[in-house]
Protein backbone atom coordinates (compact mmCIF):
# COMPACT_ATOMS: atom_id res chain seq x y z
CA UNK A 1 0.00 0.00 0.00
CA UNK A 2 1.33 3.39 -0.97
CA UNK A 3 1.99 6.19 1.47
CA UNK A 4 -0.92 8.21 0.13
CA UNK A 5 -3.31 5.28 0.34
CA UNK A 6 -2.42 5.02 3.99
CA UNK A 7 -3.00 8.71 4.67
CA UNK A 8 -6.10 9.09 2.57
CA UNK A 9 -8.30 6.63 4.32
CA UNK A 10 -11.42 7.92 2.68
CA UNK A 11 -11.02 6.60 -0.86
CA UNK A 12 -13.00 9.44 -2.42
CA UNK A 13 -10.75 12.15 -1.08
CA UNK A 14 -8.41 13.69 -3.70
CA UNK A 15 -9.97 11.55 -6.39
CA UNK A 16 -10.85 13.03 -9.72
CA UNK A 17 -14.51 14.07 -9.87
CA UNK A 18 -16.39 12.10 -12.53
CA UNK A 19 -17.23 13.78 -15.83
CA UNK A 20 -20.69 15.35 -16.10
CA UNK A 21 -22.85 16.29 -19.09
CA UNK A 22 -20.82 19.44 -19.78
CA UNK A 23 -17.51 17.60 -19.82
CA UNK A 24 -19.15 14.89 -21.91
CA UNK A 25 -20.42 17.22 -24.60
CA UNK A 26 -17.35 19.47 -24.75
CA UNK A 27 -15.03 16.47 -24.57
CA UNK A 28 -16.61 14.76 -27.58
CA UNK A 29 -16.18 17.93 -29.63
CA UNK A 30 -12.62 18.40 -28.40
CA UNK A 31 -11.88 14.84 -29.58
CA UNK A 32 -13.29 15.80 -32.97
CA UNK A 33 -10.84 18.69 -33.27
CA UNK A 34 -7.91 16.57 -32.10
CA UNK A 35 -8.59 13.24 -33.80
CA UNK A 36 -6.21 13.91 -36.71
CA UNK A 37 -3.38 14.61 -34.28
CA UNK A 38 -3.51 18.38 -34.61
CA UNK A 39 -6.01 21.04 -33.61
CA UNK A 40 -6.27 23.37 -36.62
CA UNK A 41 -7.19 27.03 -36.13
CA UNK A 42 -10.50 26.62 -37.93
CA UNK A 43 -11.31 23.62 -35.77
CA UNK A 44 -10.55 25.41 -32.50
CA UNK A 45 -12.55 28.39 -33.67
CA UNK A 46 -15.54 26.24 -34.60
CA UNK A 47 -15.30 24.40 -31.27
CA UNK A 48 -15.45 27.54 -29.11
CA UNK A 49 -18.15 29.13 -31.21
CA UNK A 50 -20.34 26.04 -30.83
CA UNK A 51 -19.77 25.63 -27.10
CA UNK A 52 -20.29 29.34 -26.47
CA UNK A 53 -23.77 29.17 -27.91
CA UNK A 54 -24.97 26.17 -25.94
CA UNK A 55 -27.37 26.67 -23.07
CA UNK A 56 -25.57 23.77 -21.43
CA UNK A 57 -22.62 26.10 -20.72
CA UNK A 58 -24.50 29.34 -20.17
CA UNK A 59 -24.25 29.29 -16.40
CA UNK A 60 -20.53 28.64 -16.31
CA UNK A 61 -18.31 31.58 -15.48
CA UNK A 62 -15.23 32.12 -17.60
CA UNK A 63 -13.16 30.58 -14.84
CA UNK A 64 -15.37 27.52 -14.55
CA UNK A 65 -15.29 27.06 -18.29
CA UNK A 66 -11.52 27.42 -18.22
CA UNK A 67 -11.06 24.77 -15.58
CA UNK A 68 -13.47 22.43 -17.34
CA UNK A 69 -11.43 22.83 -20.48
CA UNK A 70 -8.19 22.33 -18.57
CA UNK A 71 -9.39 18.97 -17.33
CA UNK A 72 -10.33 17.91 -20.83
CA UNK A 73 -7.02 19.09 -22.30
CA UNK A 74 -5.12 17.28 -19.55
CA UNK A 75 -6.94 14.06 -20.32
CA UNK A 76 -6.38 14.56 -24.04
CA UNK A 77 -2.62 15.01 -23.59
CA UNK A 78 -2.29 12.12 -21.18
CA UNK A 79 -4.38 9.53 -22.96
CA UNK A 80 -5.03 10.83 -26.47
CA UNK A 81 -8.42 11.31 -28.12
CA UNK A 82 -9.41 7.64 -27.73
CA UNK A 83 -9.16 7.69 -23.93
CA UNK A 84 -10.86 11.06 -23.71
CA UNK A 85 -13.71 9.88 -25.89
CA UNK A 86 -14.07 6.76 -23.81
CA UNK A 87 -14.67 8.91 -20.74
CA UNK A 88 -16.86 11.49 -22.42
CA UNK A 89 -19.34 9.76 -24.66
CA UNK A 90 -21.20 7.84 -21.93
CA UNK A 91 -22.04 11.09 -20.09
CA UNK A 92 -23.40 13.03 -23.08
CA UNK A 93 -27.09 13.54 -22.20
CA UNK A 94 -29.17 11.22 -24.42
CA UNK A 95 -31.17 14.13 -25.87
CA UNK A 96 -27.93 15.80 -26.98
CA UNK A 97 -26.27 12.81 -28.62
CA UNK A 98 -27.41 13.76 -32.11
CA UNK A 99 -26.42 17.35 -31.50
CA UNK A 100 -22.93 16.27 -30.36
CA UNK A 101 -22.59 14.06 -33.42
CA UNK A 102 -23.73 16.82 -35.81
CA UNK A 103 -21.29 19.31 -34.32
CA UNK A 104 -18.44 16.80 -34.35
CA UNK A 105 -19.05 16.25 -38.08
CA UNK A 106 -19.17 20.02 -38.61
CA UNK A 107 -15.83 20.43 -36.82
CA UNK A 108 -13.93 17.75 -38.74
CA UNK A 109 -15.18 19.24 -42.00
CA UNK A 110 -14.48 22.84 -41.03
CA UNK A 111 -10.94 22.99 -42.42
CA UNK A 112 -12.26 21.98 -45.83
CA UNK A 113 -10.72 18.52 -45.99
CA UNK A 114 -11.26 15.20 -44.28
CA UNK A 115 -8.55 12.71 -43.39
CA UNK A 116 -8.66 8.97 -42.75
CA UNK A 117 -8.37 9.41 -38.97
CA UNK A 118 -11.27 11.83 -39.04
CA UNK A 119 -13.42 9.44 -41.07
CA UNK A 120 -12.65 6.64 -38.65
CA UNK A 121 -13.39 8.90 -35.71
CA UNK A 122 -16.82 9.83 -37.07
CA UNK A 123 -17.69 6.17 -37.77
CA UNK A 124 -16.63 5.21 -34.28
CA UNK A 125 -18.53 8.12 -32.72
CA UNK A 126 -21.67 7.22 -34.64
CA UNK A 127 -21.59 3.75 -33.07
CA UNK A 128 -20.77 5.02 -29.58
CA UNK A 129 -23.53 7.64 -29.58
CA UNK A 130 -25.92 5.11 -31.14
CA UNK A 131 -26.94 7.33 -34.05
CA UNK A 132 -29.20 5.55 -36.50
CA UNK A 133 -27.66 4.89 -39.97
CA UNK A 134 -30.07 6.98 -42.02
CA UNK A 135 -29.96 9.85 -39.54
CA UNK A 136 -26.16 9.84 -39.51
CA UNK A 137 -26.10 9.87 -43.30
CA UNK A 138 -28.41 12.88 -43.46
CA UNK A 139 -26.33 14.73 -40.88
CA UNK A 140 -23.08 14.09 -42.75
CA UNK A 141 -24.66 15.06 -46.08
CA UNK A 142 -25.91 18.39 -44.73
CA UNK A 143 -22.61 19.19 -42.99
CA UNK A 144 -20.81 18.57 -46.27
CA UNK A 145 -23.13 21.17 -47.85
CA UNK A 146 -22.46 23.58 -45.03
CA UNK A 147 -18.70 23.29 -45.30
CA UNK A 148 -18.52 23.38 -49.10
CA UNK A 149 -16.74 26.20 -50.92
CA UNK B 1 -26.99 60.36 -58.74
CA UNK B 2 -26.47 61.24 -55.10
CA UNK B 3 -23.13 62.03 -53.59
CA UNK B 4 -22.94 58.79 -51.62
CA UNK B 5 -24.20 56.36 -54.25
CA UNK B 6 -20.72 55.48 -55.35
CA UNK B 7 -19.60 55.09 -51.75
CA UNK B 8 -22.32 52.76 -50.64
CA UNK B 9 -22.64 51.00 -53.97
CA UNK B 10 -26.33 50.18 -53.92
CA UNK B 11 -28.02 47.67 -56.19
CA UNK B 12 -28.17 50.19 -59.02
CA UNK B 13 -24.39 50.28 -59.25
CA UNK B 14 -23.29 48.89 -62.61
CA UNK B 15 -20.81 46.44 -61.09
CA UNK B 16 -22.37 43.09 -60.28
CA UNK B 17 -21.78 41.48 -56.94
CA UNK B 18 -18.83 39.08 -56.82
CA UNK B 19 -19.30 35.47 -55.65
CA UNK B 20 -17.72 36.46 -52.32
CA UNK B 21 -20.07 39.41 -51.88
CA UNK B 22 -23.04 37.27 -52.85
CA UNK B 23 -22.24 34.55 -50.32
CA UNK B 24 -21.43 36.94 -47.50
CA UNK B 25 -24.50 39.03 -48.33
CA UNK B 26 -26.82 36.07 -47.92
CA UNK B 27 -25.34 35.23 -44.52
CA UNK B 28 -25.47 38.87 -43.45
CA UNK B 29 -29.12 39.07 -44.48
CA UNK B 30 -29.81 35.91 -42.46
CA UNK B 31 -28.23 37.47 -39.38
CA UNK B 32 -30.17 40.71 -39.87
CA UNK B 33 -33.57 39.43 -40.94
CA UNK B 34 -35.13 39.73 -37.48
CA UNK B 35 -34.17 43.39 -37.36
CA UNK B 36 -31.11 42.95 -35.17
CA UNK B 37 -27.72 41.29 -35.61
CA UNK B 38 -27.02 39.48 -32.34
CA UNK B 39 -23.46 38.69 -31.21
CA UNK B 40 -23.99 34.97 -31.81
CA UNK B 41 -25.26 35.62 -35.28
CA UNK B 42 -22.38 37.94 -36.18
CA UNK B 43 -19.82 35.44 -34.84
CA UNK B 44 -21.39 32.72 -36.95
CA UNK B 45 -21.20 34.83 -40.09
CA UNK B 46 -17.49 35.57 -39.67
CA UNK B 47 -16.63 31.97 -38.74
CA UNK B 48 -18.57 30.55 -41.67
CA UNK B 49 -16.87 32.91 -44.07
CA UNK B 50 -13.43 32.73 -42.48
CA UNK B 51 -12.98 29.05 -43.17
CA UNK B 52 -14.01 29.18 -46.82
CA UNK B 53 -11.61 28.73 -49.70
CA UNK B 54 -13.75 31.29 -51.52
CA UNK B 55 -12.38 33.96 -49.16
CA UNK B 56 -8.82 32.68 -48.84
CA UNK B 57 -7.39 35.32 -51.12
CA UNK B 58 -9.44 38.12 -49.62
CA UNK B 59 -7.31 40.14 -47.18
CA UNK B 60 -8.64 41.95 -44.15
CA UNK B 61 -8.99 45.29 -45.88
CA UNK B 62 -10.82 43.84 -48.85
CA UNK B 63 -13.02 41.87 -46.50
CA UNK B 64 -14.08 44.95 -44.58
CA UNK B 65 -14.79 46.67 -47.90
CA UNK B 66 -17.03 43.76 -48.86
CA UNK B 67 -18.85 43.94 -45.52
CA UNK B 68 -19.19 47.72 -45.75
CA UNK B 69 -20.74 47.51 -49.15
CA UNK B 70 -23.15 44.84 -48.00
CA UNK B 71 -24.04 46.72 -44.82
CA UNK B 72 -24.80 49.73 -46.98
CA UNK B 73 -27.26 47.75 -49.09
CA UNK B 74 -28.72 46.15 -45.97
CA UNK B 75 -29.34 49.46 -44.22
CA UNK B 76 -30.66 51.25 -47.27
CA UNK B 77 -32.84 48.53 -48.74
CA UNK B 78 -33.29 45.84 -46.12
CA UNK B 79 -32.52 42.12 -46.05
CA UNK B 80 -35.02 41.20 -48.79
CA UNK B 81 -33.39 43.43 -51.37
CA UNK B 82 -29.99 42.18 -50.27
CA UNK B 83 -30.88 38.54 -50.94
CA UNK B 84 -32.58 39.49 -54.21
CA UNK B 85 -29.27 40.82 -55.44
CA UNK B 86 -27.07 38.17 -53.89
CA UNK B 87 -29.02 35.08 -54.95
CA UNK B 88 -28.88 36.28 -58.55
CA UNK B 89 -25.11 36.40 -58.62
CA UNK B 90 -24.27 33.50 -56.29
CA UNK B 91 -22.51 30.64 -58.12
CA UNK B 92 -24.99 27.77 -58.47
CA UNK B 93 -22.74 25.24 -56.74
CA UNK B 94 -22.80 27.32 -53.56
CA UNK B 95 -26.59 27.42 -53.21
CA UNK B 96 -26.80 24.53 -50.73
CA UNK B 97 -23.85 25.85 -48.73
CA UNK B 98 -25.39 29.31 -48.50
CA UNK B 99 -28.75 27.87 -47.48
CA UNK B 100 -27.24 25.59 -44.84
CA UNK B 101 -25.19 28.40 -43.31
CA UNK B 102 -28.16 30.77 -43.36
CA UNK B 103 -30.23 28.18 -41.45
CA UNK B 104 -27.40 27.72 -38.97
CA UNK B 105 -27.21 31.48 -38.41
CA UNK B 106 -30.90 32.06 -37.75
CA UNK B 107 -30.85 29.17 -35.28
CA UNK B 108 -27.65 30.30 -33.57
CA UNK B 109 -29.23 32.31 -30.77
CA UNK B 110 -31.58 29.45 -29.90
CA UNK B 111 -34.79 31.16 -31.06
CA UNK B 112 -36.46 31.36 -34.46
CA UNK B 113 -39.04 34.11 -34.87
CA UNK B 114 -41.60 34.68 -37.61
CA UNK B 115 -39.40 37.00 -39.68
CA UNK B 116 -36.64 34.42 -39.65
CA UNK B 117 -38.99 31.65 -40.74
CA UNK B 118 -40.28 33.78 -43.61
CA UNK B 119 -36.76 34.74 -44.56
CA UNK B 120 -35.67 31.10 -44.78
CA UNK B 121 -38.68 30.19 -46.93
CA UNK B 122 -37.94 33.05 -49.29
CA UNK B 123 -34.28 32.18 -49.45
CA UNK B 124 -35.07 28.56 -50.29
CA UNK B 125 -37.16 29.68 -53.25
CA UNK B 126 -34.62 32.17 -54.50
CA UNK B 127 -31.76 29.70 -54.27
CA UNK B 128 -33.95 26.99 -55.79
CA UNK B 129 -33.01 24.45 -53.16
CA UNK B 130 -35.35 21.49 -53.69
CA UNK B 131 -37.87 20.64 -50.97
CA UNK B 132 -36.26 17.40 -49.83
CA UNK B 133 -32.79 18.90 -49.51
CA UNK B 134 -34.12 22.02 -47.78
CA UNK B 135 -35.99 19.92 -45.27
CA UNK B 136 -32.93 17.78 -44.53
CA UNK B 137 -30.79 20.89 -44.11
CA UNK B 138 -33.28 22.56 -41.75
CA UNK B 139 -33.65 19.36 -39.74
CA UNK B 140 -29.91 18.87 -39.27
CA UNK B 141 -29.33 22.51 -38.38
CA UNK B 142 -32.00 22.24 -35.69
CA UNK B 143 -30.19 19.18 -34.31
CA UNK B 144 -26.86 21.01 -34.45
CA UNK B 145 -28.17 23.99 -32.52
CA UNK B 146 -29.92 21.98 -29.84
CA UNK B 147 -28.74 22.13 -26.25
Image: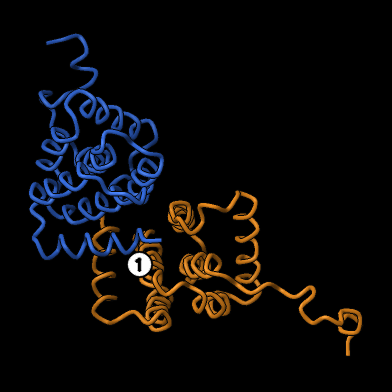
- Chain B is which colour? blue
Question: Is residue A63 shown above or below A93?
Answer: above
In the image, farthest residue toward the bottom: A1
Q: Which colour scheme is used?
A: by chain
Task: Where is residue A68? Give x, y as percent.
Answer: 62, 61
Question: Is residue B129 shown above or below B113?
Answer: below
Q: For the N terminus of chain A, which image quadrant? A: bottom right
x 27%, y 82%: residue: A133
Task: Where is residue B62? Give x, y as percent.
Answer: 33, 32
x 46%, y 68%: residue: A32
x 60%, y 72%: residue: A19
B12, B32: nearer the viewer? B32
Task: Where is residue A94? Give x, y as percent.
Answer: 42, 75
Count of marks, rendered view = 1
What residue is pinned by disc 1?
A102
Task: Where is residue A9? Give x, y as percent.
Answer: 86, 82
For residue A80, which quarter of the picture?
bottom right
Say which chain tag 1 marks.
A
Question: Is residue A11 shown above or below B5?
Answer: below
B141, A34: nearer the viewer? B141
A122 sits to left or right of A142: right
- Chain A is which colour? orange
For residue B46, which quarter of the picture?
top left
B69, A84: nearer the viewer? A84
Question: Which secondary structure lies at badge 1?
Answer: helix
Amino acid sequence: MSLFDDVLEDGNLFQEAPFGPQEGYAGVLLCATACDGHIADEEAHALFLILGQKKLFQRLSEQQFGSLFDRLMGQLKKGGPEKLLQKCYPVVPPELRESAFANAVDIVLSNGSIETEEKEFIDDLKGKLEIEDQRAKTIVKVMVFKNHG
Amino acid sequence: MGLFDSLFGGMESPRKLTPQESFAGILLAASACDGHISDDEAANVTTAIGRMRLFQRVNEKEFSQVMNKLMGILKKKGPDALIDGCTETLPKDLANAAFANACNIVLADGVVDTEEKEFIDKLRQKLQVDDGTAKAIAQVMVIKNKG
